[in-house]
Amino acid sequence: MTLRRGLPPLLVLLALAGCTADQPAAVQLGDVTRAPVTEVVEAPATIGARATATLRSPAQGTIAKLYVRDGDKVRKGQILARIRSPQAEAQLKQARQAAKPPAVPRMSLGVPNIRLAAFDGRAFDRKVAAHFARARAEARKVRDAQARKQLLSAIDLAQAQHRAQTKALAQITAQLNRSITSVLSGVTSGFSGLTSSMSSLQAASAAQARAAVKAAEGTVKSLTVKAPFGGVITLGHASGGGGTGGLNGLLSQLPGGAQQQLPATGSGTGGTPVAAGVPVSAGDSIVTVTDVSKLTLAADIDETDVLLVKPGTKAAVELDAVPGASYTAKVTGVGVTPMEGTTGGVSYPVQLKLGAGTFDDGAEAPPPSPA
């Protein structure tokens, strides 16, 4: 690739011939003109496509239908292949079953309301009062004044003690009720915390179940392979259902496993070419779509020449694959991150847009292929 950069024109100065003292000086005159001066920067470059995407099998299965061949041109959204995967279908069914709410409603934990009934001693008090009244009546029949007085005093004391005991019993009952209420309050608080924890666990489990359903649905949907953009097809190779693809299939069943797959052995050039009926593993390359509508160039410009290159600078490109042809190009971007070369020098990445090409006789040159 040759980059050409025009500099301000220079003036052609007069050239004076040498002279001696023996003869008059010969003077030559010339016209002053302007002429462009071009600095040439040569650098190796690599042709790249506008975009490339390798579409892989999301699960273990079999190629049920292949709609394209090598070199076919496809449009965005076009169906390229269908994969039959009983394993992915079964995982989706299990995930949906696990996400269903239980048929029996969840039971809430309740705490019994325990309270001691207050002692109702009114009937008993009336009976006791009647006994005390009869006792007093009998005591008053005693003729000895001293004895009668002692008996009445004893009856009064006994009645006072009875009232005190009844009051104490009521106080004990109230204290017991307060103690029971305090204990039940602590138990209720504990049950509330347990209920809250169980509710949180149930919510987390439900969220995980929904995520599993969504992941399984995405896997089943991806079994229909579609082109992400228009381009040219290159068929991939399957590992034949073995290798690390099987491990990727197991990882895809775990939360987030589908986003952290190991490299599959079928993703390279080895393995069985993709065709209808060929078994595939998760991660196997099915097709690669390459958008060649716009070709780019990636060049490495030496540090001594990079300041001569700017966006918009034109370039002439020669390809070993097309002898005798020259293609136009234009710089679209100049990188600022230096890269150390194999010889110890430093270069900078430069991006260019590749244009049309012509042969020396003016005939149109064919568009090149990405490297």
Image (cartoon, rainbow, N blue to C red):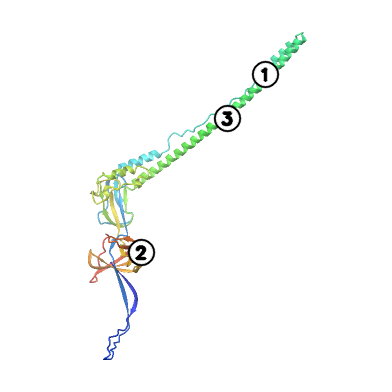
Q: Is residue 264 above or below residue 355?
A: above
Callout 1 amino acid: His
Q: Is residue 257 above or below residue 324?
A: above
Which residue corresponds to the image point at 31% horizontal and 73% vertical from the top-left?
A: 38
Measured in 3D between alpha carbons, the distance from the residue under mark 1 to the one under mark 2, in whole angstroms, is: 107 Å
Mark 2 = which residue?
Answer: 333
| Residue 162 marker | 1
Measured in 3D between alpha carbons, the distance from the residue under mark 1 to the one under mark 3, in whole angstroms, is: 29 Å
In the displayed structure image, the side of residue 221 where residue 241 appears, left or right: left
* Residue situated furthest front in the rendering: 21
Where residue 235 sits: x, y (%)? 26, 53
Write down the quadrant of residue 315 in the picture: bottom left
- Judge by depth and name the residue closer to the eye, 353 or 126: 353
Mark 3 = which residue?
Answer: 181
The quadrant of the image that shows the N terminus is bottom left
- Judge by depth and name the residue closer to the eye, 158 or 216: 158
- Judge by depth and name the residue closer to the eye, 18 or 133: 18
The local crowd at label 2, few if under 14, some if 14 to 19, many if 20 or more residues have their Cα within 10 Å, is some
Q: Element at badge 3? A: helix
* Residue situated furthest top in the rendering: 143
Q: Earlier in the sequence, mark 1 or mark 2?
A: 1
Q: Earlier in the sequence, mark 2 or mark 3?
A: 3
In the displayed structure image, the side of residue 171 where residue 295 appears, left or right: left
The local crowd at label 1, few if under 14, some if 14 to 19, many if 20 or more residues have their Cα within 10 Å, is some
**Residue contact at pointers 1 and 2, CB within 8 angstroms:** no
